[in-house]
Amino acid sequence: MKRGTLTSAKAAAELDLEVSRVLKLCRAGRLGHSRPRHGKAWVITWAEINAYRTKGPLPPGRPKKK
């Protein structure tokens, strides 16, 4: 497993997503949540990248009521 951290641009390239989508995922708490932000930049770890790959994107639409 790789070590270190990624910027949002590098994470977008790794996940094959747009940078704006990665930033939305960070604001939603799906990426960049295990480390504090560095100024305005999000710090994303390889563990978070692997967890996102395992879980995948959420299904579209509102969550079902229980």
Image: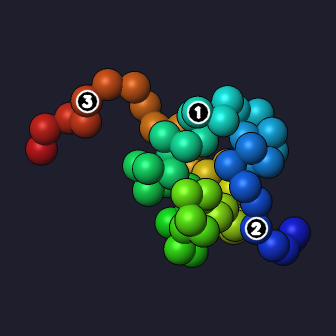
The reply to whether dot 2 and dot 1 touch (C-beta < 8 Å) is no
* 31 w.r.t. 25: above or below: below
Q: Position of residue 44 (x, y in %)?
A: 66, 62
- Specify how the rendered protein is coloured: rainbow
Give the distance between the C-alpha atoms of the residues marked 2 and 1, in whole angstroms.
18 Å
- Which label number is shown at residue 5? 2
Kindly report which numbered mark, 2 or 3, lies closer to the viewer in this rendering.
2
- In which quarter of the view is residue 48 placed? bottom right
> Residue shown at 57%/74% (left/top)?
35
Give the distance between the C-alpha atoms of the residues marked 1 and 3, in whole angstroms.
21 Å
- In which quarter of the view is residue 66 placed? top left
Q: Which residue is mark 3?
A: 62
Three-letter amino acid code of the residue under disc 1? Ser
- Which label number is shown at residue 20? 1
> What quarter of the picture does the N terminus occupy?
bottom right
Three-letter amino acid code of the residue under disc 3? Arg
Mark 2 secondary-structure assignment = strand
